[in-house]
């Protein structure tokens, strides 16, 4: 049993030594496993369950209660009474050493009754340990404080049985001063190791865990008990439990919300936008840079001075009255006459939803238009009501019917205005090239495509130069194109975690792009396979969105503790319905990596760096990020990334465009000068080169399986696809 208990399991005896009582065992731990050691069964608990339960506040509270309630032997009672009289008779003050000595004293009185008679030391051994205890006052002992105190507990019974002995009398006389001296030494070592620690605040906090101090030492009390509680206390004072209360200026306003609810292609965004164009000032918030850019262009054409701000670019116009921006870039200090927030169902997105929550709760505008899918209605109304604002609902219906086709479609037999939907970049490129080999010229749209290139492809389709579209689900959000039929080539997608079947809301979002009003009388939806899945998705009801994602504010910087510890505690703080916390794993990982790489940054700088949008899973982007950070920290100029002279491939050009975005975002975040004209020219040149590849050199950028002809992933190694490679390997084994 001992071998087991030292690893995965802990016995009741071991737990009692850690401060567990029988009551706590029943309350906080599951039923134990029974092991047989000889003739006697032994109860044991999983170590992970124990460690998890010891973080519960009820454990610390129960330790003290349980210790005090324990029935002590008469000898233990006399020893505790004698030590307590000694400590209480000492001339103490309110300094840190005496406070800490008091906690040691409290723990000693609690622990003495728990010492089994079998572990008590005989007079000879007790006298030796008493001398070790007295040596603490002069700092002449060789043993560690924790060991000395544990042995002192085992010797306590001798204090009364040998009360007439000079050593016993000396121990009782010097007892409080020995504890003070030991406390001074502990404090000195601790403050040397952590000079920034506010020891006084820790020692004066209510419910100080004397038992943990005795068992694990002052550093453990600081890191495990005090820091989390101090952070939570500070956060609770700075950050409201309800996210709506973080925006007092907005709460002082009376705002009128107009909810434009409808599916894709119902004109809901158009309705809100018409009001925005007539307003003296306003802001449009979009989920995509491309949509923000389209909004700016529309307003400029209408004679409205409009600036653009996204995470990757800025176009600030003098004397502007309107702003088009991505949701994350909303300026909460600015006042607007009218605000339009698009695609508000994004409020539930685990990574970006906080931006919509923040905008809805905090935007300073008396008139706010929210454009959203119907499933977001109840949640949005709930948030608006909680803010004390008013709301009215406008429901938008499709003016062109959406018809699901009755049979699957051969994608080679396309009609002008068709859009083929697949869910991978290599799938899009291979299908596009296959069509092109058969005399059909498609436009190409996928998520990694630079916005400028995406625009060129869309313009080609709008101008009639390309009669078809091959796209990922990037087409589903905000892209108003004259599409007659949406044809699904896949009914499954990889969402970053798993490959799964399309959800009804995803099918409806994409399918809704078919049948643009004013061009077609009907929109059609079909599939090359599994048509029943698409039909069921169109007919299914979409469950309502139940939670809004809430992020942390810059107020976390005002908590005087390590940023990672603050973020961790913020993440564990409760929140009210219908909110859930933003997934902060990216922030934690990036800040940790910055520290491991040797960067010495302030909390504000760490958070500023972690807020820069880029895909840190991409090695080249992560390397560029740290290169920029290092050059900035060393006071060097941040040069724009370059592109090799050799003819770059499609993946290389796409990566370079993302490097330019990261360079711009980093420079803006840290106030570094940027040659924006040069940056603009570089982006346009890359976008044009990518567009040229898509139009004329796509096949040379795609590799195909030498056996079956299937398109290979862009970074695939070898001449065969995985299926053909496995088949050839299996055949070789047979022979």
Image: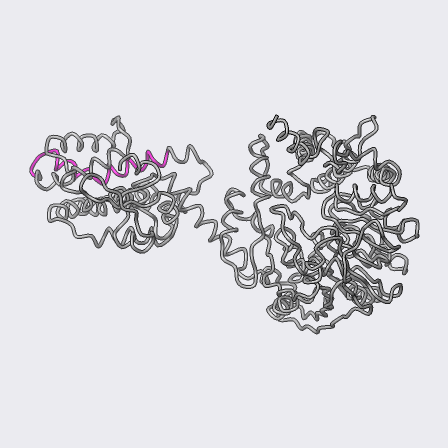
Question: Which image quarter holds the C terminus?
Answer: top right
> Quarter of the image holding residue 655?
top right
Q: Is residue 698 above or below residue 476?
A: above
In reply to whether residue 696 is colored magenta, the answer given is no
Is residue 280 visible in the rendered structure shown here?
no
Q: Nearer the viewer, residue 542 or 667?
A: 542
Q: Determine the residue positioned at 93% across, 49% down.
A: 465
Residue 478 left/right relative to 591: right
Q: In the image, 543: left or right of 264? A: left
Q: Position of residue 362 (x, y in %)?
A: 66, 61
Q: Is residue 630 above or below residue 307?
A: above
Residue at 50% x, 56% y: name it: 236
Q: Residue at x 89, y 51 (%)?
A: 467
Determine if the magenta segment contains residue 171. yes
Question: Residue 541 location in percent, x, y?
Answer: 65, 67
Q: Can you give x and y, in whole percent of width and height, for residue 578 in the image? A: 56, 63
Q: Is residue 63 above or below residue 255?
A: above
Nearer the observer, 392 or 212: 392
Q: Position of 543 compared to 444: left or right?
A: left
Inspect this view and state whether residue 138 appears: yes
Span highlighted in magenta in the image? 164-188
- How many numbered discs? 0
The image quarter in which residue 485 lies? bottom right
Q: Residue furthest front?
A: 735
* Quadrant occupied by the N terminus: top left
Spot occupied by residue 650 in the image (x, y as percentages of width and height): 80, 35
**What colouring does the structure picture have?**
one colour
Name the magenta segment's main secondary structure. helix
- Asked if residue 418 is positioned above or below residue 36 in the image, the reply reads below
């Amino acid at each position: 049993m001992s071998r087991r208990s030292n690893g995965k399991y802990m016995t009741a005896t071991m737990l009692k030594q850690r401060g567990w009582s029988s009551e706590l065992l029943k309350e906080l731990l599951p039923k134990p496993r029974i092991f047989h050691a000889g003739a006697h069964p032994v109860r044991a608990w999983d170590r992970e369950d124990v460690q998890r339960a010891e973080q519960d506040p009820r454990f610390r509270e129960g330790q003290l209660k349980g210790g005090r309630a324990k029935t002590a032997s008469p000898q233990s009672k006399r020893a505790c009474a004698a030590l307590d009289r000694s400590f209480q008779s000492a001339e103490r003050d309110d300094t840190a050493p005496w406070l800490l000595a008091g906690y040691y004293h409290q723990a000693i009185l609690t622990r003495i009754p728990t010492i089994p008679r079998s572990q008590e030391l005989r007079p000879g051994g007790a006298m030796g340990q008493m001398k070790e205890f007295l040596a603490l006052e002069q700092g002449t002992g060789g043993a560690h404080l924790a060991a000395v105190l544990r042995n002192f507990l085992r010797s306590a019974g001798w204090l009364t049985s040998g009360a007439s002995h000079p050593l016993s009398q000396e121990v009782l006389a010097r007892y409080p001063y020995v504890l003070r001296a030991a406390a001074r030494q502990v404090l000195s070592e601790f403050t040397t190791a952590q000079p920034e620690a506010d020891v006084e605040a820790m020692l004066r906090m209510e419910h100080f865990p004397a038992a943990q101090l005795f068992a694990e030492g002052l550093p453990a009390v600081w890191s495990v008990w005090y820091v989390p509680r101090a952070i939570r206390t500070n956060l609770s004072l700075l950050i409201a439990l309800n996210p709506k209360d973080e925006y007092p200026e907005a709460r002082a306003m009376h705002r009128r919300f107009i909810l434009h609810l409808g599916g894709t292609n119902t004109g809901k965004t158009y309705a809100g936008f018409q009001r925005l164009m007539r307003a003296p000032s306003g802001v449009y918030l979009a989920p995509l840079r491309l949509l923000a850019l389209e909004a700016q262009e529309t307003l400029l054409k209408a004679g409205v001075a409009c600036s653009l701000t996204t995470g990757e670019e800025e176009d600030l116009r003098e004397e502007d009255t309107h702003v088009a921006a991505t949701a994350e870039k909303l300026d909460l200090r600015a006042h607007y006459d009218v605000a339009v927030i698009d695609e508000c169902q994004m409020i539930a997105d685990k990574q970006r939803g906080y931006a919509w929550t923040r905008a809805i709760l905090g935007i300073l505008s008396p008139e706010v238009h929210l454009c959203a899918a119907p499933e977001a209605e109840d949640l949005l109304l709930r948030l608006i009501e909680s803010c004390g604002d008013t709301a009215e609902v406008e429901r938008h219906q499709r003016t062109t019917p959406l018809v699901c086709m009755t049979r699957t479609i051969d994608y080679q037999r396309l009609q002008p205005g068709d859009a083929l939907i697949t869910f991978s970049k290599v799938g899009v490129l291979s299908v596009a090239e296959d069509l092109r080999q058969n005399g059909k010229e498609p436009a190409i749209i996928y998520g990694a495509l630079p916005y400028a290139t995406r625009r060129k492809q869309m313009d080609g389709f709008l101008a009639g130069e390309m009669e078809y579209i091959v796209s990922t689900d990037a087409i589903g959000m905000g892209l108003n194109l004259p599409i007659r039929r949406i044809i699904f080539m896949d009914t499954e997608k990889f969402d970053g975690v798993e490959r799964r079947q399309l959800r009804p809301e995803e099918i409806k979002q994409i399918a809704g792009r078919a049948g643009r009003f004013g061009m077609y009388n009907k929109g059609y939806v079909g599939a090359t396979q599994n048509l029943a899945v698409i039909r069921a998705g169109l007919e299914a009801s979409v469950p309502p969105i139940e939670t809004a994602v809430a992020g942390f504010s810059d107020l976390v910087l005002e908590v005087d503790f390590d940023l990672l510890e603050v973020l961790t505690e913020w993440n564990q703080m409760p929140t009210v319905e219908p909110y859930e916390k933003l997934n902060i794993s990216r922030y934690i990982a990036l800040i940790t990596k910055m520290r491991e790489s040797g960067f010495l940054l302030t909390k504000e700088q760490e958070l500023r760096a972690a807020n820069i949008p880029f895909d840190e899973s991409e090695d080249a982007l992560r390397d560029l990020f740290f290169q920029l950070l290092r050059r900035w920290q060393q006071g060097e100029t941040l040069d724009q990334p370059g592109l090799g002279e050799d003819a770059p491939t499609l993946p290389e050009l796409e990566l370079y465009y993302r490097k330019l975005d990261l360079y711009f975002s980093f420079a803006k975040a840290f106030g570094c000068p940027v040659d924006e004209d040069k940056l603009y020219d570089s982006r346009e040149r890359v976008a044009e080169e990518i567009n040229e590849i898509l139009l004329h050199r796509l096949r040379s950028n795609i590799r195909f399986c030498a056996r079956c002809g299937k398109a290979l992933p862009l970074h695939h190694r070898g001449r065969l696809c995985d299926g053909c490679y496995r088949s050839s390997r299996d055949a070789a084994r047979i022979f």
